[in-house]
Every structure is written in C-alpha cells, then in structure tokens.
Image (cartoon, rainbow, N blue to C red):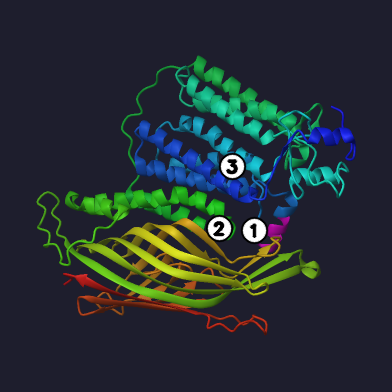
Amino acid sequence: MVLSFPGNPLITKIMEKHFLMDISNGGVLYQAFYLLAFLSAYTILIYEGYKRKFPLLSWVLLLTSVQLAAIIGTKVFSYSWNDWQYMFRNHTLLLNREKSLLGCVLLAAGTFLAAKKIMKFRYPVWDTFAIAFPVAVSFMTTGCFLYGCCHGTITHLPWAVQYPVMSLAHYHQFEAGLLTNNDLYSLPVHPVQLYATAGGIIVALLVMRLRRHLKATGSLLICSVMLFVLMRFTVEFFRDPQTNRFGGDMLWILKQVQWLYLLTATVMGILLFIREKSFKTGPDIGEIVLPGLTLQVLFLLSLVIIFALLRNWFRLPEIMALNIALVPALIFTGIEIYKRSSSYRYRWVFVCSLILPIFLMSQTLPQTKIDSSLIKNYKTYHTIGGGFATGSYTDERTNFTGSGCDMVSNTEYFTQKYTAGGGNYIYTLENPEKETITRFGAGVALGNYRQTRFSTGIMSKFFLFDFHPYVKYDTRWIGIGGGLHMGNIPFTRGDTNQEGTGTTTESNFNTYLFPQFYLRVGIARYLFADFHVADQLPVSSPGLGFQAGVGSGLGLKSGLNIRTGFSFLERNSYYISAYLPIENSIVIEPLFNWTFHQSIPDGYPNLPENQFSLGISYRFGHK
C-alpha cells in the first residue's frame, strides 16, 4: 500500500470515490444499537430457556444477574492502571465511554457460575449463549461503525469510508501528521466494524447449522467461542492499533491481542475435540430442587440494590439495557408471589392489571367464601383516586478535571418546574389470617415539565405522559413491589459532582420505560424503613421518583402512617408524607419535599425549592 500525504491530487481523486460518513447523530445511533444488542441477546436467551423447559423465574433472575455483570464488565475493564489508582485514591468511579468486550465476557461468565450455584440451577445452560453472544456483538459493532470508534487502517478499496473532523479516525491521522487543519475528512479507512458485524452473523449461522452435529453439553458454546475469536483474529489485521485499548502493540508479526485470540481458539478447539471424542450419553439429571421464593426475592433485591448504588456511574443506554432485564424479573417475581399466596380464582386479576386495569362497578365484590381446598379467607375491595403534584426547584451539576491545585471545576444550575395530575385504580386482596395484603393497580398521569439552564437561558419543555401497572405484596415484617412506567417520562438527575465530563447541558433524562420498585422492612403499624423508586402516587416524575426514609403507624390499626426521609438524588433534599384514612372510605395522601441550596450565586433566580403532592382516593366496600 502506498501512502501519500494530503494535498496530493492522487489522494484527492481517490477520496472522492469513498463513502463520507456523517456521525452527527452517531451517539444516538450507538446507544440505539447498544440497546438492541442487549435486547436481542435477552430475547434469544429467554426463547432458549423456554424451549429447554427451564423454570422461568429462576432463568430470568440468572439472566438479570448476567446482564448486570456484563454491563459492569464492559466498564471496569476499560480503565487504565492510572485510572484505577486515581479512583482508589479519591474513592470515586470515573465516567467512561469506552467498552471492553473481554471484560464483558469475563465478568458475565464468572457471575453466571456464582449465580447458578446460589440459585441451585442444575440445568445445562451454557449452549443457550452460543447464538445470543455473536448476535449481540454484531449489533454493538454496527453502532461502533455509525459512531466512528474502533476504526480501521488506511485503505483505498472501493468500500472504504472517511470520517469527519472530531471523529477518532480524523484525530489519529491528524496527530500522525497525515492530515492538515484544512482536511474536513479523514483518509479512507477499512469499515472494520462492519467486518466484525458480518463475522458475528456468520458465526451465529454456522453455530445454528452445527448444533445438530455436536453432541456433548457445552460443545455448542465452545464452538461458538472458537469461531468468534478466529473471526476477531482476522478482523484485527484491518483495525488501527491505536483503537485497541489493550493489546494493540505488536509482538513479532502479530498484535498482542491476536496472540491471545490464537491461544483461545487453540484451547477451545482442543476442548471441543476431547469433549466430542469422549462423549457418552450421561444419566438424566433427575429431579431438581428449586430454590425457595424467599431466596429468589432476596437475590432480585440484591441486584436492584447494586443497580441503585451504581446509578450515577451508568449512562442512560446502560440504565435502559438493565431495565430490559430488571423489569421482567420484577414482573415474574410478582407473579410467583401471587401464585403462592392466592387462590386460583383471583389470578386473572393480576394478568389484567399488567395490561390494562378494568374499572369495575363501584361496589366491592362479595367477600370470598372459605376455600375448602386451601382454607383461606380473603377480603377484597376497590380503590379509585386521583391527585396532582407540582414543584419548583434547582439542580446543581458540577464537572471537574484534575485534582488538588490543578483542579478546574464548572458548575451549571438548572431550574425545574412542573405541574402534573393523575388517577389510579387499585384492587386489594387481604388475608387476615396470614396478615398479608396484595395490591394490583395501575395509574395514569399527565403534565407539563420545563427545565431552564441558567448560563444560557435555554429551555426544554416536555409533555409528561405516564401509564404504570404495578403489584405490591405486604406481610407483617416486609413489603415488596414493582411495576413498569410507560410513556414519555422525564426524571431529573439531581445534584451531582462528576469528573472529566466537560460542560453539562441538561440535568434530566427522558425515557419511555422505567421500573417502579418498593421495599419496606419493619412493622408498618409501629416502625419501619422503606425505599421507593418511581413509586409516588399519583405522580412520580420528574422529581419525586427516588425516596428512602423511615415511618410509623403510631400504633394505630386504621392503616395511618407518617413517613420522612430524603431524596437520594438531591443533596439536602428531604420529604415528609402521610397516609391518612378518614373513617373507612376516604384516604388522603399529602407529601411535601423541600431542598436546601446554599451555594447558588447571587443573581440567579431564587426559587421556592420545594415540591408538593396530594392524592385523594375512595375505597369501595372497605371495612
């Protein structure tokens, strides 16, 4: 290959024949394909589990843990040694746009082994990943192509592409002296990301064709990994070494990472040969004892807590990808809780509440008779209510680079104002014998939300629409619940400090799906602690979605309680709320949230810094 420098007429003539990439929307497209990667893998794995007749709840929980580990793995393995030293010294996590495929695989595999043992999941499952893995990678590398990362080496082949100024390819070539300030596009490079996409699809098709010929359990995944690393070994010949975060340096005639790929392919090939050569039909796995529901709920709760603790570290696409797994896990757990705590005749209510609640007649159903087979006595009633919420407050976002005397900070302030209203319906089923209460509900909310950036005066307006089915299950000592918000839902991110992110242009995120979660520990009548994510009626967004606190029922049997705590996204933000039954029918639910901002400079609007919510509902047939 002959390289010519910019300005040469030959180069100009060749460049005119190549594809010019527009990456102005590359970030959005990368995020979309990132989500498609996880959605496709999750869908394939659910189907594989269903086809193999795995217990659905346990399988969904395992996949949720793997998805969480995979996303964390793509992040933690992309940091340099200097990054890790900085994070240990400062006890913080740096935001990072880089992704590591190796980290994704290693942490996901390790987590799966541990979770499989905890959940006592003895089914043969490794082969379920054989097709899902290369398909997911194909989606991710397509996003890389549209974003402009992981670019190829310079070439003049007809299908070469050129990336514009501010792209990684243009930057690397400019630093190497191959471009000048007048060059608006990079020299043509291999679309190496599309090579990887095509390779992933070919691997998936080969695996599908070979699945009938491989007999031993696990051989299909071993074959998939072997073919995949051979594909990546080949693609590395056309990838620019500067885009390899690790292993891009040459070692003799190959990159370091290529030697790793060759070693992995060799080991996988030997394993595949040995397993297939020595394969014998083994005994049936026999009866498998599944874990108890308590263990499954605690396992899910641990995943939710990890997700909540790392919330500021995850980017929006990562949060949405995690919701793809967490929301089904919450729904299936709710279904299982209901199956084990309710008679068959009421299960249809739960199904309807997850799709569209039917507003039934405004009178309670007759009290359920004693079920002779299950010996359970239930009380049921309906609740219909509505209310509104309004807020006016400020978010503070400080970005800084460097440390010590060299630290440079940039603080942006954002005003948040909203008014919204909504209604909800709840079907309640009580078991006085076991002191359990199960609620199936759904709500809808509408409103207007406005955010203004102080430094520029730029205003963003949103029309808020939210439909959310949910289920809650309360015992004497513990309560848990979950649901799914669907619609056009904005949430404010709160006050945060972030390192190395430049200037913040907004302090909210907008999503079409968002999970609802509720946890209570303690006796509601006396003293309890609770945790809420998007669980405030009638309206959770944009500012009432994240609460943690304590409460008490003051020893009363009426169900009254008073709660207080803090919004864990906002610094110095506190709330007090109440659940106030009046006689047996009317319930009033007020909430007041206030925030102390003492660092806002003079000259900025002096907002009230508070939020208020009021819900009023009527319980038909409650006694």
Q: Dot 3: what SS? A: helix
Position of residue 1 relative to residue 187, above or below, is above
- Determine whether, in the image, residue 502 is placed left or right of residue 414: right
Q: Which residue is mark 2?
A: 310
Residue occupying image coordinates x 76% and y 36%: 240
Whether residue 476 is visible here, answered yes or no, is no
- Determine whether, in the image, residue 402 is placed left or right of residue 284: right
Q: Position of residue 575 (x, y in %)?
A: 45, 77
Whether residue 504 is visible here, answered yes or no, is yes
Reply yes or no: does residue 310 show up in magenta: no
Reply yes or no: does residue 88 show up in magenta: yes
Amino acid found under the numbered disc labelled 3: Cys
Q: Which residue is mark 1?
A: 93
Upstream in the sequence, badge 3 or badge 2?
A: 3
Amino acid found under the numbered disc labelled 1: Leu
Predominant SS of the magenta segment? helix
Q: Which residue is mark 3?
A: 104
Upstream in the sequence, badge 1 or badge 3?
A: 1
Q: Position of residue 614 (x, y in %)?
A: 36, 77
Per the rendered image, the range of residues in magenta is 85-91
